[in-house]
Image (spheres, helix red, strand yellow):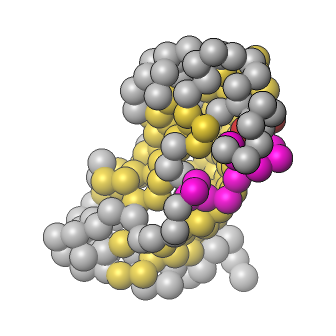
Amino acid sequence: MAIQVISSAYTDGPTLTAAAAASCVPTYVPTTLPAGYWQIGRIWRVTQAGRISCAVTTPGTARWDMRLGGTVVFDTLAIPLNIVVQTTVPWFLQYTVTCRAVGSGTAANLFGQGFWLSQAALNVAAPATGPGPGGNTLPYNATPVVGGGFNSQSALTLDFFFTQTVATGSETLHTHTVEQMTP
């Protein structure tokens, strides 16, 4: 099987500290996929890693998503962060998306699942209410479903976002790779 790199980063993304969604990759990473790129059964593996911080009293949540033309096509959903302060600890995120449908309007969609690992995911005081020991399957605490519908017949910009619910932490992406696993 030939693997083709679709997108990669060789420098850090911005350090994000606001309680709002923002692109987490360096400015040269967003790329435009040509109209008709997606085919049913096409699979991508997305691998990202970086560092994250969260506060002890208001850790909030972390959320990563992949967007095509502004539409969220894969979403980790909000992952509760550690209630014990974490300062610039590593994180690792990997997921695959498979094209399930193609077409115009909002007919095209991708189905994704993966995992996120970090000590920032540990919820030491109440393990029954928080993420598992250091990681989570994704999407977090929800049944996997297809992402938002998009028009696969149009050229679409590919971008990656991070959102935190409170402005008491930070996130910086260090590495990013999107690999096409199938023709």
Q: Quadrant of residue 173?
A: top right
In reply to whether residue 137 is colored magenta, the answer given is yes
34 left or right, relative to 111: left
Q: Position of residue 91 (x, y in %)?
A: 74, 38
Magenta highlight: main SS: loop
Give the residue at x 78% y 31%: 125
Q: Position of residue 42 (x, y in %)?
A: 51, 79
Q: Is residue 61 above or below residue 16?
A: below
Q: Quadrant of the C terminus?
A: bottom right
20 left or right, relative to 64: left
Q: Is residue 104 above or below residue 66?
A: below
Q: Position of residue 179 (x, y in %)?
A: 63, 63
Is there any visible trace of residue 24 in the rendered image? Answer: no
- The image shows a total of numbered marks equal to 0
Give the residue at x 40% y 27%: 20
Q: Nearer the viewer, residue 126 or 31?
A: 126
Q: Position of residue 106 (x, y in %)?
A: 22, 69
Q: Quadrant of the N terminus?
A: bottom right
Specify the farthest residue to the left. 105
Range of residues picked out in magenta: 130-141
Q: Nearer the viewer, residue 137 or 6?
A: 137
Give the residue at x 60% y 80%: 182
Q: Is residue 79 above or below residue 1?
A: above
123 left or right, relative to 143: right
16 left or right, relative to 68: right
Give the residue at x 49% y 16%: 167
Q: Nearer the viewer, residue 127 or 27?
A: 127
Q: Quadrant of residue 109?
A: bottom left
Is there any visible trace of residue 116 in the rendered image? Answer: yes
